[in-house]
Amino acid sequence: MRLWLVIGLLLTATGAFADVSVVASIDRNHVAFGESVTLTLAVQGTQSGAQPSIPRVDGLSFDGPSTQSSFSLNNGQMSQSVSFVYQVTPARTGEFTIPAIAVNVGGNRYSTEPIRLVVEKGSAQNDLSQEIFARAMVPSKPVYLGQTEPVEVLVFARADVPFKGLSSFNCEADGMGFKYLQNMKQGTQVINGESFHVAMIQGAISPERMGTLNFGPCILKAQLTVQKRGRNGWPFDDSMFDQMFGRVEVREVPVTVDAVPIEVLPLPEEGRPADFGGAIGQWKLDVTAKPTDVAVGDPITVTIKVSGNGNIDTVPTPKLGPLDGFKTYDPTTKTTKDDLNTTGERVMQQVLIAKSADVKELPEVRLAYFDPEARAYKAAVQSPIKLVVKAGTGGQTTIVSGGGRLRPDEKLGQDIVYLKGDLGPAAPAVPFCGTATFWALNVMPALALLGTVGWKRRTDRLRGDVAYARRTRAAKKARKLLTSATSYDEIQHALQHYLGDRLNIPVGGITASVVDEQLVPRGVNAELADRVRACFEACDTARFAGGGADTSIQATRDNVERLIDELETKQL
């Protein structure tokens, strides 16, 4: 028995990489929008192939892989293989090509053949079309370029349908700037006398170009809990035992939403104020100044708050009018907004110092904006704020530091240590054993030993713990990729590599969804999560917008470096 075991091991060792072949295949080449296909990479002749890196394909997402290995020894002939299985989900209709995929085996590189995949528009037919359906709730009137408008997708399931939830949601909204919340709202509604369970997907659109654009078609996969049937011939083959023993399975039913046209108009030229800076929505101003009764040289803190409905990112920071009678300092600004960017608030604080007692008021503050509901330009105006400025006492002024903190003038004679005329008694001699040199000579060898032990443990952990090694080297590796990045695709690739290594997940297929699926559950704050998500969206937009991208490659690279620096401070 031992002899056969040794022979088997020798056969495995000598033939581990003999006659290696790599083949990629999908279970279907034509699918309807909303369906997924299974991609299998079969590596024949070995069980030790490295996990392949799936190339990015615009419009396709790759989930996985799951790994399957097999080994057999028949009449002295050894057969072994390893398969990597992915679920491929299209995000839109059209024709796609899954490019050649490289797999490294035993130091050799093997490549697959490209695969063609056609995704067609097709209505998902099922026997529950009257019992479970979906509707899109979009604006009934035209929207304006740059306007942010809420939209909703509602899923209705009749009360007796065992609706569990949604497993996926895909919606074509090219040029609409569509985004949605992952968490659904749920409730009930009565339609024509029948009770329905309602699941609401909340989203928002922000059109990026003019014309008639389509929201949809959309396809959702509804999850239904279906009881498994008992064995054939069992005398009690009914739902009683299914319920008692919990024999249920989850069945996915595709539900479609037809495309809805939305007309997108440009902002009107007529009536546009000269100081209009791009703000769209309904906005209001709140301006305060404290204190308003001061002496010359005293600081006045001015707070300007803009809040309302719309995309706060389109609202410029309001500025005070002429400030010739004041000494000014750089303002600080804080912006907050909801997850869909349909409401927001921006608060600006600025320190002013009156130069003379002739100053009587703070100037007017004005914000021009376009109101899409009224289809007209409006202005939010804060009238001048009265001030009482008195002459200063003693000719002293207050100094404001860069961070807005106040400190008094230094006073001569109180902040200077004068020279001593008498040196005083000599300090007593300190024995050598009490000097810093003595302790340094004794402590440094121990510290060196501890450092060597720590370095050895860290090295061993880097070799044995793959997750720790990926996490430790993530930032350095990503920064190296950023240094050589010359396109938005390479910049996004560097961010994907960093998140994949830091979170110990496959790099292939990482998109903006990793923010909600991985970063937010690990405690990343909403502001940083929004910035990571926005970086993905900006890269996607820039890659497909050509010369029309708003952000330069250098600015995008700098933004990714800042995101990596901040994520490095988080415990993920």
Image: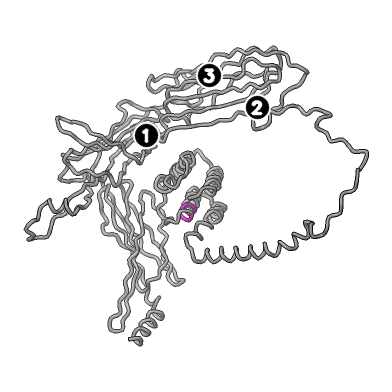
- The circle drawn on residue 261 is none
Identify the colour scheme used: one colour
Please name the residue shown 79% across and 57% down the image.
Answer: 434
Mark 1 and mark 3: Cα distance apart in space: 28 Å
Q: Residue at x 38, y 84 (%)?
A: 6
Residue in the image at 75% along x and 62% along y = 441
- On screen, residue 46 versus residue 238, left or right, reads right
Span colored in magenta: 497-501
Q: Main secondary structure of the magenta part?
A: helix
**Circle 2 — which element?**
loop
Q: Nearer the viewer, residue 469 or 74?
A: 469
Distance of label 3 from label 2 (alpha carbons): 20 Å
Q: Would residue 501 be found to the left or right of residue 234 on screen?
A: right
Location of residue 178 (image quadrant): top left
Q: CA distance from mark 2 to mark 1?
A: 38 Å
Residue position for label 1: 204
| Proximity of marks 2 and 1: CB atoms separated by less than 8 Å | no
Q: What residue is disc 2 on?
A: 329
| Rendered residue at 35%/86% (across/down) | 2
Q: Label 2 sits on what residue type?
A: Tyr
Question: Which residue is the site of mark 3?
Answer: 366
CB within 8 Å, label 3 to label 2: no
Residue 309's place in the image compared with 541, above or below, is: above
